[in-house]
Amino acid sequence: MQIQDTIAALATAPGAGAIAVIRVSGENAIDIVSSIFDAKSGKILKDQDTHTLHLGNIKDDNRIIDEALVSIFKGKRSYTGEPTIEISCHGSSYIQQEILQLLFRKGCRAAKAGEFTLRAFINGKMDLSQAEAVADLIASDNAGAHQIAMQQMRGGFSNEIAQLRQELLDFASLIELELDFAEEDVEFANREEFQNLITKITRVLKRLIDSFATGNVIKNGIPVAIVGEPNVGKSTLLNALLNEERAIVSDIAGTTRDTIEDELSIGGIGFRFIDTAGIRETFDVIEGLGIKKTFEKITQAQVVLYLINADKFRNQPDLFIVEIQKIRNRFPDKPLVLVANKIDHLTEAEQNNINEQLSQLIPEKSKSAVLLISAKTGLGVDELKEQLLQFVNMGALRNNETLVTNSRHYDALLKALEEIEKVQQGINDGLSSDLMAIDIREALYHFGEITGQVTNDELLGNIFANFCIGK
């Protein structure tokens, strides 16, 4: 990692716009930009105070490229923890490239993906989990994902881990000290307090590990499979949910032969809806492949919407009951919403009868529900959205609890818990201090992996390679 270089990159999205921002960071950043900037005030840029703005011209010798606003961040008082300049220029793609090429000729090099944030991590401006949250914040496309990323970027998760690690480190130091006095058979670490700490760490780790199931789906969107027999209104429902003509709707059965996916934010939570091929017996090879993919999507989905033609169910309920039981038996742990569609021409008594029959198919205390809708008219669609929200642990989000969303953190937490459980077993078995110290060191190692106190170039490369250029 060439962190001594002065780097430059476009910090705003590429392409034409009203304004573009070019970020320059490194020991020579201010000197380099001073050499190409002519302030309207006549002041020398490098002599100005930190956190000040200056209007002037960006010049290549005597040629003016653009009139721009330059921001100065001196010393460690910048995002990267090193001297930084931000040039706000007009958003012409030509102007952007002219300024960048001029900076490169003056001694900058092009920043790599995530290099500004990497430098912020190396210079102690943030820990590794906070740095990863920056990428999550940029990628967030709904209120839930944004809230989790902001909570992590502010250090909520890393502070919790750092506190546990420090408490464990303090006890580990006392246990290591005992090893120096092994022949005198003394205990510096109070075993009762140590037991209480291990119990506390185990409880916190399990809570964080359990939160991954919720945090991960909020971050990436909750996949919802829309399934049912052909021509039951699956594509119509997808269009109604999205409020646009996303899928082809036809009276011809089997129109949808592949899956169609789109995303929607409901109550600040991202849902990824998957319209699937109708499930039926078929000799059509292409349609058969679509039905096979339908079952693959059900496997991947967090929630299944099983659509039923309400009129056909009213006349032949036994046929549907068999199919519903097949789905329940094949996917017993998935939240299942039985959606009786096309109710707009049924009487209230007929609707109540259908609702009662379907409700009898829902096991007690299961994550399942029954709804009656008309996808064509939109009747009941809002109630369906509300039902989907009930499958999400909104309480944790509302209470601003720490939610783990990163699979790397999840893996490190699992490994740390495994080592802590070994320590607990050692306490129970009266294991000697030297053997317990080994497991404690391993637990500390995995805690350090999360915050970046333990790291290597390969890990950093993998993490920051996923960032956008300029961040």
Image (cartoon, helix red, strand yellow):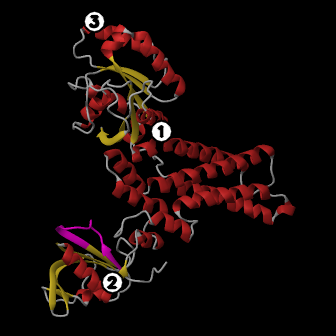
Q: Earlier in the sequence, mark 1 or mark 2?
A: 2
Q: Earlier in the sequence, mark 3 or mark 2?
A: 2
The numbered disc on residue 349 is 3
Report which residue position mark 1 lands on.
Answer: 300
* Element marked by disc 3: helix
- Is 71 displayed left or right of 260 in the figure? left
Horizontal placement of 194 versus 301: left or right? right
Query: Is 282 situated above or below 456?
Result: above
Specify start and end residues of the magenta stretch as a single range: 7-21
Q: CA distance from mark 1 to mark 3?
A: 37 Å
Distance of label 3 from label 2 (alpha carbons) = 76 Å
Sequence-wise, the earlier of marks 1 and 3 is 1
Q: Main secondary structure of the magenta part?
A: strand
x, y (%) of residue 424? Answer: 71, 46
Q: Which mark is residue 328?
A: none
Mark 2 is surrounded, within 10 Å at the Cα level, by few (under 14), some (14 to 19) or many (20 or more) other residues, namely many
